[in-house]
Image: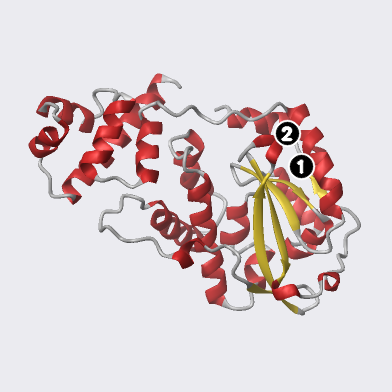
Amino acid sequence: MDLIREQRNLETLGHRLQATRESRDMSPLQLAAAMESSLTSIRDWENGARKLQSATVRRLAEALELSYPEEMYWLGLSGHIPSTRMPAKKQIIQALSAYYEDLERLPFPAQIIDHHFTYWIVNSATIDFVGSREGLIAMMQNKLTALDVVFNSQIGFFHRISRPEELINRQKQLARRIMGRSLHRRHENFYQDYPTWLKGRMSAEDYQIFTDIWEEANAVNDEHLQRPRLEDDIMLRYFEFQYPNERVRRLQMRADHLRHFGDIFEITLFYPYAGGDSHDFPPSSSDGIKLWEVADVDHLLRTYEA
């Protein structure tokens, strides 16, 4: 990690430490006493002037009653969780090619995305699900992500959710799922810079909706000691989707990590709800799309190292 990024992370951690302490109605002196530390140390940490040891972060988590996601975030910001390393290009293509053959046999939409939410594979049934083949290729060449698809009103998917409230549910579910998947990555450059990066890819109205939901999903401080709700984490709820032929189909989603790469890649499936007829999804395209056949994957992988 470069020194500028390391200092920025320490300052971010300092701001979160101060905000959390104040939300607990604790003075710096009270926190120092609870940790059996010094007032000077508390002030240095809140000012981003001193790096925290992992044991110190854990003591802070205990004193401030942090949620587990927040504790992991603080450990990452203080440099105690390494950044994710992408596999070699050859390894990725070899493994994903094998999965592609199976996904192409499915009569319903299936994709593979990575931990940056970027689409690497879409099967032929997905093309009808998202948009035209040519349009989908162009978007994948521009690093199409799941958040683009769900939040950008200029993309066909946005308009095909039958009920507006279902779109909002999908957006919130996706944001929560991303935060859950990124539990040990929220300190990384991508996750901190992503909202700004996405700003130039959608309208001001779409971006405002995204930032509101993103900030809500990212609020893991438990400042009001809110208890998590089961319905917030169930991802198999159905939604109604209108295909280009105007037929409305009720779908549900399932996501699974690819065992070859841990949680770096995942398969997402959209299949008929409550045992509907899977063969009622005849795709209009004969082939799906593989990212490495339509885009410069070498360049893409270099951006993951930035």
Name above or below for residue 1 compared with residue 283.
Answer: above
**Residue 186 picture location, percent across and down:** 45, 40
What is the secondary structure assignment of the residue under circle 2?
A: helix
Question: Do the numbered discs 2 and 1 sit on residues whose CB atoms are within 8 Å?
Answer: yes
Quadrant for the N terminus, please: top left
Few, some or many residues within 10 Å of mark 1 (<14, 14–19, 20+) = some
What is the secondary structure assignment of the residue under circle 1?
A: helix
Q: Which corner quadrant of the image does residue 41 belong to? A: top left
The residue lying at 50 percent from left, 43 percent from top is 182
**Residue 260 picture location, percent across and down:** 71, 36
Q: Relative to residue 34, is residue 82 drawn left or right?
A: right
Q: Which of 293 and 273 is in front in this view?
A: 273
Q: Name the residue under label 1.
A: 291
Name above or below for residue 23 compared with residue 60.
Answer: below
* Earlier-in-chain disc, 2 versus 1: 1
Name above or below for residue 98 compared with residue 128.
Answer: above
**Residue 291 picture location, percent across and down:** 76, 42
Few, some or many residues within 10 Å of mark 2 (<14, 14–19, 20+) = some
Kind of residue indicated by mark 1: Leu
Q: Would residue 288 be seen by someone viewing this image from the given angle?
A: no
Q: Name the residue under label 2.
A: 297
Quadrant for the C terminus, please: top right
Q: Which of 125 and 234 is in front in this view?
A: 234
Q: Would residue 192 be seen by someone viewing this image from the given angle?
A: yes
Q: Relative to residue 119, is residue 227 drawn left or right?
A: left
